[in-house]
Each structure stands twice: as structure tokens, then as C-alpha cells.
Image (tube, helix red, strand yellow):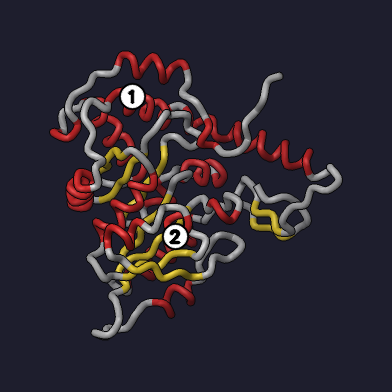
């Protein structure tokens, strides 16, 4: 019997084209900046995200941790959702390794943080309190069923953060899924942010790796932090080669995944004993309340 594993999009496997590219990859020492395949991946990622530069990291968790450490100092505060991946699923790394305080705000059913909640959570200039330095958004939002944050909402949060002297980091592990659902270029979802990390191994079939993007100065600082965290890699163009195909080829096929997920949900909902959320934030960005599934 052949099984289809639906536990997560992290169980995807490299395509034959990726395996061939990995075998043929030109490599060098990436810690010295001498791996041409990694350099190409980082340049491609930055261009896609509308950022100046990128840095290849082993995982999305390290990407988010590196971003927070690059943006913040010890004792600073970060605002994020109470269902955020960084809060729930990353081992408390920002606190354990960075001495950074996580201030959680309730995630709404559509994955957003209310603008008024963000604004009221920003600390005053008071020596008794930590400095609120950063806001983290997650798109798509994992614990809210993979819902998509809109371009307009992300821009509004970015504007609010910047007006208050803060920065915005986007946990975009599945940001290409969000762009596919909204049928827009991915950079329209990322440009309002000061940094964004996205995964190559979730739905895009690469065996490992994430890319963190931001300004030249931000990435230079992130590169130092990556080394500190033990994320410096050597002839890793073998992995980067798969990442290039993930961006150039597999992002174009995410619509197929969405269509199959919708088809599966529409079939499951007809079965007795299967229940779904009452609010459907569907795969194409529509926020209509109705009886249905949450994909």
C-alpha cells in the first residue's frame, strides 16, 4: 500500500532535479564567503524578497533567532502573537540565548495582531521597563491553520512599528504560500518588514535550509551572529543548489498543493465525525464567514 504523509509540508523530499543539481554544485568555504552556489542563492533570495541581502542558515528557527538577536539588545522586548512559532516552538531561544523578553499579544482568528493591541503594548520611555524594540508577524500563520496575512495589514503594522521607532521582522517560513494564495509577487508581502526569514524545506522540497533577508548592514550583523550560534557552514553549496531550484521551480507549483488541499478538505467535510472551524480563511485570501473548513 502506498501512503501519502499529510503530517506536515516538512516531509517533502528533494526532487530528481535537485539531487542532480546537488551532485553538480560548485562549492567553496561559505564562512569565508567563497561558495559561489551559496552566494547565488542569497542574491536570488534577496531579490525575491525585495531586500538588499540574504544569508543562508540551517533552519528557520535559527533564522528567526538570528533576526531577533540582530535587531535587539539584551533586556529588550519583542511583541509577538501568543500563538507565534517563535513563542511556542523555538525553545525559548530569544530569552535563553539573547536575554530578550517576549511580550505576547492575542492572535485573532485570522492570524493578525490588532493594531490597537500592538500600539497599547509598546512601553513608554521609562527606566523601570524594557525597551520595546521589535514586532514579529508570521505569514502564513501556522497555529491559525495556515491563514494568510494581507499586504495591506503587513504594511499597516510596518508603518506603526516604524513610527514608534521599532522594527518589524516577518517569520515567513511559508511566505511563498501566502503570495501564491493572494496571487501577488512575494516582495509585496515582505517589503514593509525590516527582515524576513523563509524556509526552503517546507513545501519547496529542499532537504534543509532557510534564508534570512534584510539590509546589507543587518545581514552583516546576522552573519556574525550565525557564526556565534554555530551556524557557520563550509562547502554547503551542495544544499544551496537545492534551495535555488526550490525558489526558481517549486514556488511555481505551490498552487497545485493548494488545490489538492482544498479538494481534500471538501471531501473530508462530508464525512461523519469530521468537524472544522466555522470561519474559513481559504487558500485564495478570501475572509468570508461561512460554515466550512480551515485550510
Residue at the extreme right = 272
Cβ–Cβ under 8 Å for marks 2 and 1: no
At x 27%, y 27%, the residue is: 236
Residue 208 in percent (x, y) is at 39, 33
Residue 266 in percent (x, y) is at 76, 41
| Residue 47 in view, yes or no | no
* Location of the N terminus (image quadrant): top right
At x 67%, y 34%, the residue is: 260
Crowd rating for badge 1 (residues with CA inside 10 Å; few <14, some 14–19, many 20+): many
For the residue labelled by badge 2, is the local secondary structure a helix, a strand or a loop? helix
> Between marks 2 and 1, how big is the CA–CA gap?
31 Å
For the residue labelled by badge 1, is the local secondary structure a helix, a strand or a loop? helix
Q: Is 223 left, or right, of 57 in this rendering? A: left
Residue 39 disc label: none
Residue 87 disc label: 2
The residue that mark 1 highlights is: 241
At x 33%, y 24%, the residue is: 241
Residue 50 in percent (x, y) is at 33, 46
Please tell me in which quadrant of the rendered image residue 244 appears.
top left
At x 52%, y 30%, the residue is: 12
Residue 225 in percent (x, y) is at 21, 49
Above or below: residue 175 compared with residue 42 = below
| Residue 157 in view, yes or no | yes
Amino acid at each position: 500500500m502506498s501512503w501519502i504523509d499529510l503530517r506536515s509540508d516538512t516531509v517533502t523530499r528533494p526532487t530528481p532535479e535537485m539531487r542532480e543539481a546537488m551532485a553538480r554544485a560548485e562549492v567553496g568555504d561559505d564562512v569565508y564567503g567563497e561558495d559561489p552556489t551559496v552566494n547565488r542563492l542569497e542574491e536570488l533570495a534577496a531579490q525575491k524578497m525585495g531586500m538588499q541581502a540574504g544569508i543562508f542558515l540551517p533552519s528557520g528557527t535559527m533564522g528567526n533567532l538570528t533576526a531577533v538577536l540582530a535587531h535587539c539588545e539584551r533586556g529588550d522586548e519583542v511583541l509577538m502573537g501568543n500563538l507565534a512559532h517563535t513563542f511556542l516552538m523555538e525553545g525559548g531561544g530569544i530569552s535563553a540565548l539573547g536575554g530578550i523578553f517576549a511580550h505576547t499579544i492575542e492572535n485573532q482568528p485570522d492570524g493578525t495582531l490588532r493594531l490597537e493591541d500592538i500600539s497599547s503594548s509598546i512601553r513608554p520611555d521609562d527606566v523601570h521597563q524594557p525597551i520595546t524594540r521589535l514586532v514579529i508577524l508570521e505569514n502564513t500563520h501556522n497555529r491559525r491553520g495556515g491563514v494568510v496575512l494581507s499586504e495591506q495589514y503587513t504594511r499597516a503594522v510596518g508603518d506603526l512599528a516604524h513610527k514608534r521607532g521599532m522594527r518589524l521582522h516577518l517569520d515567513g517560513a511559508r511566505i511563498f504560500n501566502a503570495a501564491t494564495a493572494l496571487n501577488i509577487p512575494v516582495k509585496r508581502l515582505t517589503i514593509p518588514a525590516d527582515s524576513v526569514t523563509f524556509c526552503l524545506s517546507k513545501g519547496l522540497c529542499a532537504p534543509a535550509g532557510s534564508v534570512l533577508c534584510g539590509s546589507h548592514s543587518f545581514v552583516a550583523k546576522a552573519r556574525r551572529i550565525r557564526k556565534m550560534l554555530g551556524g557557520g557552514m563550509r562547502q554547503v553549496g551542495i544544499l544551496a543548489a537545492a534551495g535555488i531550484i526550490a525558489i526558481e521551480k517549486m514556488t511555481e507549483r505551490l498552487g497545485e498543493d493548494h488545490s489538492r488541499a482544498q479538494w481534500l478538505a471538501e471531501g473530508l467535510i462530508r464525512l461523519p465525525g469530521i468537524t472544522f472551524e466555522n470561519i474559513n480563511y481559504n487558500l485564495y485570501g478570501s475572509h468570508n464567514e461561512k460554515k466550512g473548513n480551515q485550510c
